[in-house]
Image (cartoon, grey):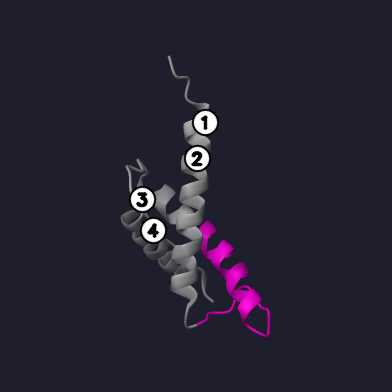
Amino acid sequence: MGIIAFLVIGLIAGLIARALMPGNQSMGLLATTLLGIAGSFVGGFVASLFYTDGRVFDLHPTGLIFSVIGSMLLLLLVGMAGRSRRVRV
C-alpha cells in the first residue's frame, strides 16, 4: 500500500473514530492523522488474526473498519490515561 493511501486511510479512520467516541478530544489534524495511522496498525494486527495469510499491511475489505476500531481503542486508552493524571482537589 502506498504511503499516501496509508495517510489518507489513517486520516479518515481518525476522523470517524473521533466522531463516534463520546466526549471532547481536543486534537488537531496532525494528531488525528497519527491516531488513525496508529489505529490502522492496531486494526491491521487484529485483522491479521482473522485472516489466514496473517499479513498486517495488506489492504483488506474490512481494513477501514478495523482501523476505526483500533483508533477508538487508542482514544479510549488515551482518555483513561489522561483522567488518571489529573489532580482532584
- How far separated are the C-alphas under marks 2 and 3? 21 Å
Q: Which mark is residue 84?
A: 1
* Amino acid type, callout 1: Ser
**Residue 77 versus residue 43 in the image, above or below:** above
In-front residue for pair 87/14: 87
Q: Earlier in the sequence, mark 2 or mark 4?
A: 4
Q: Quick one: label 1 or label 4, which is nearer the N terminus?
A: 4
- Give the Cα distance between marks 3 and 1: 25 Å
- Counting residues from the start of the chain, the first of labels 4 and 3 encountered is 4
- Disc 1 versus disc 2: distance between alpha carbons? 7 Å
Reading the chain from its start, which is encountered first: label 3 or label 1?
3
Residue 51 position within the rendered picture, expressed as x and y whole percent measured from the top left: 62, 82
Viewer-side residue, 40 vs 19: 19
Give the structural element (helix, strand or loop) at label 1.
Answer: helix
Viewer-nearest residue: 32 or 65? 65
- Residue drawn at point x = 47 percent, y = 58 percent: 71
Of marks 3 and 1, the one in the foreground: 1
Q: Is residue 54 left or right of residue 40?
A: right
Check whether the beta carbons of the residues at disc 2 and disc 3 lie within 8 A of each other: no
Badges 1 and 2: C-beta atoms under 8 Å apart? Answer: yes
| Secondary structure beneath label 4 | helix
Q: Compared to 16, does 32 lie above or below?
A: above
Residue wearing tag 4? 17
Q: Residue at x 48, y 66 (%)?
A: 67
**Residue 17, image x, y percentages:** 39, 58
What residue occupies the far top of the structure in this picture?
89
Q: Residues within 10 Å of mark 4 (few under 14, many from 20)?
A: many
Report the span colored magenta.
Answer: 38-60
